[in-house]
Amino acid sequence: MKIALVTGSAGLIGSESVRFFCNRGGSVVGIDNNMRQISFYC
């Protein structure tokens, strides 16, 4: 089993990377600090 670790998985490039690896049958671990929430939901 292949596992991909994607940092910044909630961002634009990170989320597309997660989708890319999932579509190829891999397991994905996504890590993000969700700092965008502070900018958009204050």
Image (spheres, helix red, strand yellow):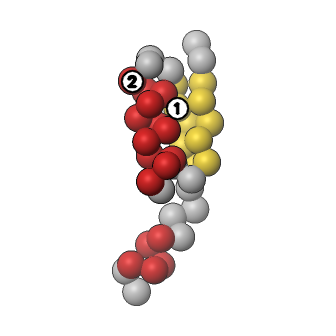
Which mark sits nearer the N-terminus, 2 or 1?
A: 2
Amino acid type, residue under disc 2 in the picture: Asn
Residue ID at (44%, 19%): 24
- Tag 1 secondary structure: strand
Q: Are marks 2 and 1 in contact (CB under 8 Å)?
A: no
Q: Position of residue 8 (x, y in %)?
A: 57, 53
Q: Position of residue 16 (x, y in %)?
A: 43, 42
Quadrant where the C terminus sits is bottom left
Q: Quadrant of the N terminus?
A: top right
Q: Is residue 34 above or below residue 9?
A: below
**Residue 23 placement, left or right of 31:** left
Tell me where residue 30 sits by quadrant: top right
Residue lying farthest to the front in this orientation:
13
Neighbourhood count class around disc 1 (C-alpha, 10 Å): few under 14, some 14–19, many 20 upward: some
Frontmost residue, 5 versus 17 = 17
Q: Which residue is mark 1?
A: 28
Q: Where, by quadrant of the figure, is residue 2 drawn?
A: top right
The residue located at (37%, 80%) in the rendering is: 41
Q: Residue furthest top?
A: 1
| Horizontal and vertical percent position of residue 23 | 39, 24
- Discs 2/1, front: 2
Identify the secondary structure beneath mark 2: helix
From the viewer's perspective, tell me whether residue 15 is left or right of residue 2. left
Q: Which label is found at residue 9? A: none
Q: Is residue 40 left or right of residue 13?
A: left
> Which residue corresponds to mark 2?
23
Q: What amino acid type should be assigned to the residue bearing mark 1? A: Val
In the rendered image of this protein, does residue 35 appear above or below residue 14?
below
Q: In the picture shown, does residue 3 fall above or below 29?
A: above
Residue that protrudes farthest toward the bottom in the picture: 42
1, above or below 6, in the image = above
